[in-house]
Image (tube, rainbow, N blue to C red):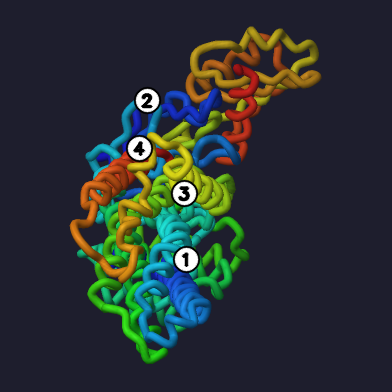
Amino acid sequence: MKAVVETRDLTKRFGNNYALSGLTMTVPRGHIVGFLGRNGSGKTTTIKILLDVIRRTSGEATVLGEPTGSVAIRRRIGFLGEDKRLYSYMTVREMIAFTRPFFPTWRIETETRLLADFELPLSRKVSALSKGMRTKLGLLLNLCRHSELLILDEPSEGLDPVMAEQMLQNLVRQAADGTTIFFSSHQVAEVEQISDHIIAIEKGRVIFEGSLDHLRQRFRRVNLVFDDPPPPEAFRRDGVDRVIAQGRTISILASRNVDEIAELGPLLAAKSVDVQSVGLKELFLEKLKGDHANS
Amino acid sequence: MPIRKVWRESRWRFFFILAALLLITCASVFYNAKAEKVVIESKDFHEAGIRTIRGALFLFWGFSAMFLGLGGFLRERAVGTVDYTLSLPISRTRWFLYRSLNGALQSMAAALIPALAVPVMAALFGGDYPVGDAFLLGLRLGLGGMLFYSIGLLASTLFAGDFTSAGIGIALVFAVNNSTRVIESLRRLNLQDAIIPIYVIDPPYLIRGQMPWNGIAFSLALSLALSAWAWKVTVARDF
């Protein structure tokens, strides 16, 4: 698996607060990678370090095999920020004319197609564009580059559902064209909709990562109902991420040894044993709870 | 491309400052010419011209040059465009270079153009002021006073917020100018004297003899040092 982004023990400290505390992750090439995390979990800080807008406190980070800060790699990447802020004093035409010469792989035919699709008013100033229009312009400025990597920070933030859907579909089309998409979001549904690889973070650390299919196959919830429940510790073993005892029910989230846990139920006099697959939202929430319980 | 961006971001501020300085210069020449009726009669605008350039223009240009130094990545962070700018394939050093050169040239123009308005004003009154003198004085003002511009450049890289950096810049310009007037040991460093020495204002109020290039060179060196500091901060800090 070739990586387009790699971080190892990445930390970022603002005063006494750690925004990132030992973030180690890999963004594989050719995938749509959802960077999932709550507000304030460190997603934007990570992206800003990758773009060299802010500097890491310690650790390592590479983009397209080069250390962050390399001007050359910025010719090969695109970026769309959360606010989609562009130069307010320029018109749409000027914004495109300003950005185009920086990128040798810029495709005029894509520019023409997207201008028609997005119905962008060329002579309107950026300051007079709605957030939806600014997003379209930002997307156009990035998609025309045909870059190897496109980084987006909360791309659907503040967009209406129609616009958000249009944007996601454009990302899927771009990925099909060979661009790796790395986008942050706190909305599990949109991450699950288009991503095929997930990196979830909390408090500046990865809480789980992997391909979406693999995560879905790997994690299982085992629900056991007892007349007289045994202590939760009876289920603690390798692969068990979380054990919740609630009345007569014990619910176990496990990534390994699922069969062993399920077989343990009858041995401990369980009245019923139910093994279920786990959705991304459930997994994310469970991992968050687990992370909070551990901290 | 990048130079176009820095020009677009600063041009209205520059035009406003230039218009204000031209207005101040013309008003000052007019006032000085009217105050000295003999000037009107003799058509000799030498004194009115030198008083304007050394007085009103020097004072207002100093603050204007400081304002022309403001801007940069901290300003872009405030309006939300810094992420986009820094994601483009241009190094921070190049952005800084374009911005500082653009501002320095604007400061120079803001010194030269109003200074050259003095002979124009004199001609309008039917009098005379040497264009060569006006050009040289404007050039010296622009070069020697580059320190004021560098103060603005540095303040805008150290302090976020337009008002904070402008306020600190104004205070520093005042401090630099007044300390060299009040403190005896610093008198030799006074920019007004370094740029337009006191001896040129004796009649006939024209440039005579050797100008104090050492003072101008010292001011320029200090200005370069402040600019280098601003560059170091720009390259190193988080946005």
Which label was assigned to residue A58?
2
Graded by Cα atoms within 10 Å as few (under 14), some (14 to 19) or many (20 or more), the crowding at tag 1 reads some
Considering only vertical position in the picture, is A56 above or below A102? Answer: above
x%, y% of residue A3? 28, 39
Q: In this view, does A216 lie to the left or right of B96?
A: right
Which label was assigned to residue B236?
4
Q: Are marks 1 and 4 in contact (CB under 8 Å)?
A: no
Q: Are marks 3 and 4 in contact (CB under 8 Å)?
A: no
Tell me the quadrant of the picture where the C terminus of chain B can be found: top left
Number of the front mark, 1 or 2: 1
Distance of label 3 from label 4 (alpha carbons): 26 Å
Number of the front mark, 3 or 1: 1
Distance of label 1 from label 2 (alpha carbons): 53 Å
Q: Which mark is first along the chain, 1 or 3?
A: 1
Between B187 and A133, the residue placed more toward the observer is B187
Task: Determine the secondary structure under disc 4.
Answer: helix
x%, y% of residue A156? 55, 58
Which residue in the structure is indicated by mark 3?
Answer: B173
Residue at horizontal 60 percent and vertical 33 percent from the top: A276
Q: In this view, does A273 lie to the left or right of A82?
A: right
